[in-house]
Image: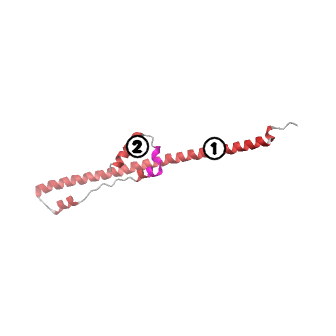
Amino acid sequence: MKKSILSNPAFRYIFEVFIIVFSVTVSFYIQNELDERDKMELKNESLKGVLIDLDKDKDFYNAALESIFYRLNSSDRLIEKGIDSGVLNSFLSYWGFVGHDASIKSLIATGAIEYISDENLLEELTKYYETQ
């Protein structure tokens, strides 16, 4: 009776080792792909948050412009009519800008900023948040 190669213990041992190595390799590959997908999703969500932050900053800038125009009108009133309490109060208020940067901090903290492939976008984001 002829022995089959499948009944040889050495072949079975090598075959089992190959299956284990192959399974572990595929498992690592799948986990790596899932991690990449999670990072891309995190990047996209954080960039949506950056857009929301920029809209908030735009609203803040518009409010600051209104305040500046109000102060300009008050200064015209001061020149024309003299000093009164309303004019003085408008000059004494302080308007400071506090930018909304939670989303960009999230991008940096999680490392998802590495997944922004558009160099121009990355440069503009860096310029904007560094000049605050």
Q: Is residue 111 magenta?
A: yes
Q: Is residue 109 magenta?
A: yes
Q: Where is 18 relative to 89, above or below?
A: above
Q: Residue at x 28, y 56 (%)?
A: 96
Residue range corresponding to the magenta coloring = 106-115
Label 1: how many residues lie within 10 Å, few (<14), some (14-19) or many (20+)? Answer: few
* Rendering coords of residue 28 (x, y %): 60, 46
The label nearer to you, 1 versus 2, is 1
Write down the residue under mark 1.
25
Q: Residue at x 50, y 47 (%)?
A: 39
Q: Secondary structure at mark 1?
A: helix
For the view shown, which residue lies furthest in the front direction? 10
How many marks the image carries: the answer is 2
- What's the coloring here? secondary structure
Q: Is residue 122 left or right of residue 2?
A: left
Q: Is residue 81 left or right of residue 1?
A: left
Return the mark for residue 122: 2
Give the CA distance from mark 1 to mark 2. Answer: 34 Å
For the view shown, which residue lies furthest in the bottom direction? 85
Q: As shown in the figure, which amino acid type bears the numbered disc 2?
A: Leu
Q: As shown in the figure, which amino acid type bears the numbered disc 1?
A: Thr
Q: Residue at x 79, y 43 (%)?
A: 9
